[in-house]
Image: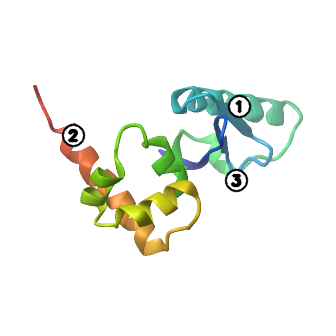
Amino acid sequence: MEKINVTVEITENNYSAYINLLPGCVAVGDNFEQLQNNIKSAVDEHVSISREFGDTLPEIFNKDYELVFKFDATSLLQHYKGIFTMSALERLTGINQRQLQRYASGESIPRKSQSDKIARAFHKLGKELWIVSL
């Protein structure tokens, strides 16, 4: 199954998403779950209308595909701010709390190596949680 990247951003008021492969295909939502549903609907509608009018679509839309949601570091940290404290994120990532706060506020943009550390920490935690059984 092919993967299509969906860029997710968090604004003051909502979540927003767009797909570079489909210019103009955007969606918003009050929360991440609503955003996921809205962008799936937007893609379906965009593809359907494009086909109806004979517009050219990337070949990937003629196959089975999966939407993969990509956050930037700021949006990811904002998304989880009510779940993880900066202290907990420091323990997970090895990145200083003050620096994480700068990333979360958008005051500073992490280098690729720092973004990779954050991503690896979340993936590791996800894998650990996935195997938990109660």
> As rendered, which of 7 and 98 lies closer to the eye?
98
Q: Residue at x 65, y 43 (%)?
A: 11
Number of other residues with Cα within 10 Å of mark 1, as a class: few under 14, some 14 to 19, many 20 or more: some
Whole-angstrom CA distance, mark 2 to mark 3, is: 32 Å
Labels 1 & 3 near each other (Cβ < 8 A): no
Disc on the earlier residue, 1 or 2: 1
Q: What is the quadrant of residue 26 in the picture?
A: top right
Residue kind at label 3, given as amino acid type? Asn
Instruction: Using the image, tell me which numbered label, if any, was put on residue 42.
Output: 1
Visual colour scheme: rainbow
For the point 50% across and 46% down, the residue is: 78
Query: Image point 36% across, 61% down: which residue?
Result: 97
**What residue is shown at x 52% (from left), y 45% (from top)?**
69
Q: Badge 2 is on which residue?
A: 129
Q: Badge 3 is on which residue?
A: 20
Looking at the image, residue 1 sits to the left or right of residue 88; the answer is right
- The percent position of residue 86, horizontal first and vertical second, equals 36, 53
